[in-house]
Amino acid sequence: MRKAPYLFIAPFLIVFAAFGAYPLAYAFQLSFTRWHGAGQARWVGLDNYLFLLTNPEFWESLANSAVMWLLVVPVQIVAGLAAAVLLANARLKLKSFFRVAFIAPFVTPLVAMAQVWIVIFDQDYGLVNYVLNADIGWLTSTTWSKPTLALLFLWKTTGFAIIILLAGLQAVPAQVYEAAALDGASRSRQFWSITMPLVRRSIAFLVVIQTLAVFQMFAEPFVVTEGGPYGSTTTAGLYLYDHILASDLGTGAANSFLLVLLVFVLSVVSVRLLRAKDE
Amino acid sequence: MSTSSISRRSLLLGALSLAACAPGGTAAPTPSRLAAPSVTSSSPKGEITIWNRSGDLFKVFDAAIGKFRAAYPDVKVNHLSVDIGAKLANTLITGTDVPDGSFWDDANIGSQAEHLYDLTDLIAPYREQTAPYKLSVNTVEGRIYGVPWDLDPGLLWYREDLLAEASIDPASLTTYDDLLVASQKLKERDPKARPIHLDKNPFLGQLWLEMLANQQGTSMTDAQGRLRLDSEEYRRIFTWIQKAAKDKLVTHTPYLEPADLASIENGQQAFIPWAIWWSFAPQQLLKQTKGKWRPMPLPAWTPGGARSGVMGGSSFIIPAKAKNPQLAWLLYEFLCFKEPGIAAVYGPNSVYPGGLSTSIPSYLPALDPEKPLFKDDMGLWKVATEAARNIPPAAPIPAWWAKSVDYLGNNLQLLIEGKLSPDDVIAESSKKIQRNLIDRS
């Protein structure tokens, strides 16, 4: 009789062990070895970790991701919240149109969007430079490559932020706003005193999820800039992949665990900073 | 109801136990040596899967494989178009669904030798008839893991009409210094001219750099894998690039992208030192300047010096876990060494009515200057085959070559942009390649 609960959860445990715990433990073990995908793995202790921690390129990749985070997450929270408030407004006309317009980039394949980005931001023949009558290397200069890539990420994922924030907004009881209105609170006052505190958890969730996404960002730089020019868009995720591509699997594994640690710390800090005072 | 709890510690212990079960890459597949095919009977049988690149080349090979099928009717060939660069290395490492054979860039083969058949014995009968460069670059510890496919000699592509207007005799361009003088002359006639193409793509730029090094009989590393960027040969190349860029004789654009094509078409570029595969541009892409480009041997670095070098190229590999390696070899042998196979690949076909002219065979008997395999109106076959016969051998391409583009390839771009000096490029690239790649390989 006591075995029954374990039998019920056994399918999950088996799948989790095979595809979650085992690969994780395997990668952890791998991070202490020098292995190129064939032959004998050589135990090197902490060498892979030391190599990364003393390698300027590792820190540059983190710095690139940190800049991307600054360019993406605050903008996304503000823009996402504004769009969600707009969509939550009962008097908004063409609500379905706006919903589709905001969500469409989120469900569009990234590679297709990336190709559009490459075309419209081309220095010589791109639409953007044509409209601005400029000669800016949006994707080929170290100054502009990160903002241009961040814009693609924003375009692609802000729809997801809107979904999360809209769900948070719709969970706020209408009576709270009605009571505030009866008490004479302005719309601005309602936003800062009701909306913001009550969607704080949604914002915290979004910050954590997007922090994870930005530090793992891979496909965008891989397709659009290949990490260039001069490594300026080599994000932490892409840098990790570089080790795998070079068959330096031990360093790749060590890099991934350092990233896990970093993202864990950032997530905890974000949650603590955004936690409501009464929690 | 009583329950027994599973503590976090137990879960952790479980995970560690799982880790202990991990193979940890300790299974050591020693390189397998492929023996001569046992399928010597007239009707070998079986099924093979061959990976190839997509696009026009795939169609050409598909037709050529059709000829193989006609010669060996009992061998079924599954010819697949695959993103080899993205998938082959991973497939070899995981050992799942590996093909029986695949074409692969020479720069990638050394790093995966442990997953490939050692083909040294099989290529032995053809060794004397094969371009030495192609054998040397795919040699790891004295054994050959990639058998040569195409050969890609470097050539100097020039605008015949522009040189004629400026009274520049192409035959006078025997050294790279001559090339600078001629470029200066073109620039004096047309101030907008930036006659020499230097590529803006770091990977292609490094590939091009290695062609110039190969021409001088050197390469990034020696046969023992020691770095030799800090050498007279590389310094000579970097100094020349610096001078060309400083004198504004250079068009710095990415290979055949719109900006590059525009500057080719409007007469800004007149010299393109590049591999034979640039022939694709005048034949397929260019409109206004079609018919105005001609190939000639590369200039030499020193008077009387070598005028050939290789830029890129691919070879054929057979994975160690291939199901029918001997049949894969049979296909390779047919396409590379048998006249019907060679003619099917390079001769006129439905995709290229004049034949495939973006490379030439690495099988030397096929390189008769008087018997062109493909037709062209630029004299390409004659120039390319003569260049091919003088290509110096090279050291094996190191396994980390592609990764070194992050250092050398990028620094080369900074040199062209005037942000690094030749000494900076050598010092910076050497330091990082040694620390991050060689010391960790």
Image (cartoon, grey):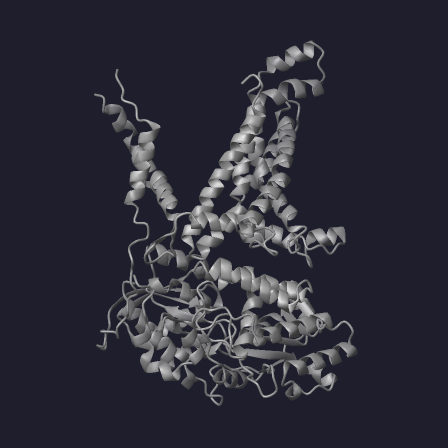
Residue displayed at 68% across by 69% down: B251
The percent coordinates of residue B207 (x first, y second) are 54, 69
Image vertical order of residue B207 relative to residue B1, above or below: below
The percent coordinates of residue A109 (x first, y second) are 52, 46
* Residue B255 appears in the figure: no
To which quarter of the image does residue B62 belong?
A: bottom left
Horizontal side of B54 relative to B239 (left or right) equals left
Name the quadrant of the N terminus of chain B: top left
To which quarter of the image does residue A11 belong?
A: top left
Asked whether B87 or B237 is in front, the reply is: B237
Name the quadrant of the C terminus of chain B: bottom left
Horizontal side of A92 relative to B436 (left or right) equals right
Residue displayed at 64% across by 24% down: A89
Residue, far bottom: B370
Image vertical order of residue A193 relative to residue B296, above or below: above
How many numbered circles does the render carry?
0
Residue displayed at 50% across by 68% down: B227
The percent coordinates of residue B52 (x first, y second) are 41, 65
To which quarter of the image does residue B48 belong?
A: bottom left
The percent coordinates of residue A119 (x first, y second) are 63, 54
Asked whether A279 or B427 is in front, the reply is: B427
Asked whether B219 or B127 is in front, the reply is: B219
* Residue B92 appears in the figure: yes
